[in-house]
Image (cartoon, grey):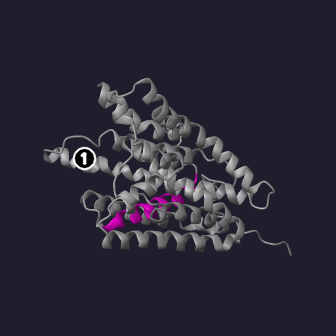
Amino acid sequence: MTPVTLQSADPSPTVWQPNSHCLQLDGLRGLAIFVVTWYRFTKEMPVDSVLGKTLHGLFDIGARGVDLFFVLSGFLITGVLLQAKGKSNYFSGFYWRRALRIFPLYFITLFALLVLLPLLLPGSKVTTQVGVEPANEIYLWTYCSNVKMSIENAWCFGALDHFWSLAVEEHFYFVWPLVVLLLPNRWIIGTALVVGSVSALSRIGFAMLSDNGVAPDVLTIFRLDGLCFGSALAVAVRQFPTLREYRSHIWKLAGVVLVLASLMQLTGRGLWTIPTLCWAIGWTLAMASLVLSTGDHWLARVLRVKPLLSLGRYSYAMYVFQCPQLVLGSVYF
């Protein structure tokens, strides 16, 4: 008897395929940097009117683009690690590519702002605005600015405060490759979900019990939920292809969670960082829906538009230069 092959009722290819480049994820990165930029450039808008307060609250949602970056980074980095697993250059290949992508722009920027600028314009207004206390500079050079902020309970790096998120990612990159290498793939999902959940719950508990309002926002151990949930998704979509059958339900759940997160954000209250957890879950569900959808889905088409793809291509540079650019603009304009 000839074996019967069961064919899917929806045979069209999904947006994402294992170990292949996905344009829509570039567009998603572009969307993330767009909303973060939107937030940065409207953060100082006046709030002395009802309209101003309303618009400020809406624009403030753009700050949650950082949570999308975390989810996306966890998904992509874990995918790279899974593809390299078992190869002799597993560690060297990964860290070499990361160093080439991240280090040059970051360290050139630090050198320009912390070394060259004070030499060329000593005592000037722009140097004062951009500069960092000499005792704190070591934390930037070693990707530990978020640790210093947490200890001091202060945003103490001026125009370079935003580098806390790069520090979180670097810490994650340092540890996660070892986890992926040592654990069977089927265990990585559970490990990532547990670590991400413990990180979020410990952050919420700390926010409830402590007067330190900065550490829950920036300290690595408190910000692993997005990275870990994205990592769990990277393994899940490879291990369980039948997830595609549930993508419409995942879309609906993502919408509910993101709307809930937005409403909590608009209240203007921290709610012990519970909204941060909701954003991490919502972005993860939204990403799951995207990678499980077909290429003709409306969101897949939107994320392929050239402006978003261009933003995604230059998102890292845009993120590095954003805050220094704002400070320089305030000095000269």
Q: Which residue is mark 1?
A: 56
Instruction: Give the residue at x 60% y 56%.
Output: 173
Q: Is residue 153 above or below residue 116?
A: below
Picture quadrant where residue 200 is located: bottom left
Left or right: 7, with 173 as reference point: right
Picture quadrant where residue 14 is located: bottom right
Using the image as rendered, state which of residue 181 and residue 138 is in the foreground.
138
Query: Is residue 120 visible in this depiction of the protein?
Result: yes
Left or right: 291, with 5 as reference point: left
Q: How many marks?
A: 1
Picture quadrant where residue 282 is located: bottom left
Instruction: Give the residue at x 68% y 46%.
Output: 97
Outermost residue toward the front? 135
Q: Position of residue 230 (x, y in %)?
A: 54, 61
Q: The C terminus lies in which quarter of the figure?
A: top left
Q: The N terminus lies in which quarter of the figure?
A: bottom right
Q: Residues within 10 Å of mark 1 (few under 14, many from 20)?
A: some
Q: Position of residue 320 (x, y in %)?
A: 48, 40
Left or right: 170, with 55 as reference point: right
Q: Which residues are magenta?
A: 272-294
Using the image as rendered, state which of residue 146 and residue 73 is in the foreground.
146
Instruction: Give the residue at x 34% y 44%.
Output: 39
Main secondary structure of the magenta stretch: helix
Q: Is 291 one of the magenta-colored residues?
A: yes
Residue type pointed to by label 1: His
Outermost residue toward the left? 49
Instruction: Give the residue at x 38% y 40%.
Output: 159
Q: Position of residue 100 (x, y in %)?
A: 65, 41
Q: Is residue 249 above or below residue 35?
A: below
